[in-house]
Amino acid sequence: PAVRSVIMSFQRYGIWGVEWVGLQNFRDLFAWRDFYTALRNTTIYAVAYVVANITFALGLASLIFPLSNKVQTFFRAAFYLPRVTSAVVVSLVWAWMFHPSFGLLNQVLAFFGLPPQPWLASPATALWSIILAQVLTMPGSGIILYLAAIGRIPETVYEAAELDGASGFKKWWYITVPLVKPTTLYLVVIYTITGFRVFTEIYVMTRGGPGTSTVSLTLLIYNTAFRDFNFGLA
């Protein structure tokens, strides 16, 4: 399939037939404004997704680790639960929460006397609202991996730091963070791939709108292939 997709990229391949066009699809692509919009949106989403997930995962794992094994097990299950729930279902819940009229978030704002916000209805806030939804869906896999990585750090290292008068934050910053770097690198790679492949959340909540303010590369590929039937350009 990968080889076939490369061959198709040099063809005008659609329901009307197949024609070899050479580099024309690439010329059309790099002259297409929507491509750069999708690339920008996807990059913003991926960077925010990676930074937020790494920060939350490491921070929460560091807070959970000192607790008892039973409590750790509870939090592992609680934070991992959204990952085994259908992404479509989670996205539908967030779409309801962002609804401008009866959504939960605007109801909370109204309770505090604040005006409602056009979360998904405004080009200025739609992409950031989707990012917010992903940030608040806690990175369960990252928390579990960080808990395992922290558990492998020898206790003697922390004891030596305590003898030198290190505070709790300094032990975390100078011992925990450096010694879990292999896990951090792995998660950065995985989250970057996941961030650039974002599709379901955008398709369910905004379909790439308003306008093209939330269109991603994967959504653009999907629309080009299955809406416009231009498989070569897709």
Image (cartoon, grey):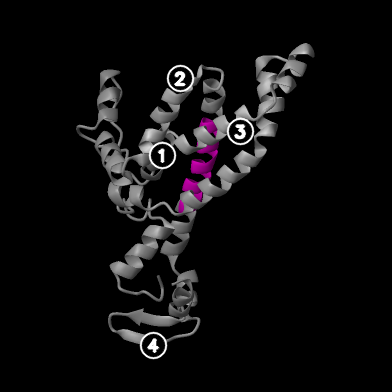
- Residue 106 in the image: state x and y as whole percent: 27, 29
Q: Of the residues under marks 1 and 4, which one precedes in the sequence?
A: 4
Residues in magenta, as a range: 42-57
Query: Which label's residue is closer to the chain start, 1 or 3?
Result: 1
Q: Main secondary structure of the magenta part?
A: helix
Image position of 229 (left or right of 221)? left
Tag shown at residue 134: 1
Q: Mark 1 and 2 residues: CB-CB less than 8 Å, in contact?
A: no
Q: Nearer the viewer, mark 1 or mark 3?
A: 3
Q: Which numbered disc flags the more N-terminal residue, 2 or 3?
A: 2
Q: Quadrant of the C terminus?
A: bottom left
Residue where numbered disc 3 is placed? 149
**Is residue 201 one of those drawn in magenta?**
no
Q: Quadrant of residue 153?
A: top right
Q: Nearer the viewer, residue 208 or 219?
A: 219
Q: Amino acid at mark 1?
A: Gln
The structure residue drawn at horizontal position 44% and vertical position 36%, both measured from the top left corner, is 135
Q: Is residue 52 visible?
A: no
Q: Residue furthest bottom?
A: 19
Q: Is residue 170 above or below residue 230?
A: above
Which residue in the protein does label 2 denote?
Answer: 70
Residue 1 locus on image (x, y percent): 43, 72
Residue extending farthest left: 102
The residue at the point 36 percent across, 36 percent down is 82
Tag 2 near tag 3, CB within 8 Å: no
Left or right of 25? Residue 84 is left
Cα gap from disc 1 to disc 4, whole angstroms:
41 Å
Residue that label 4 marks: 19
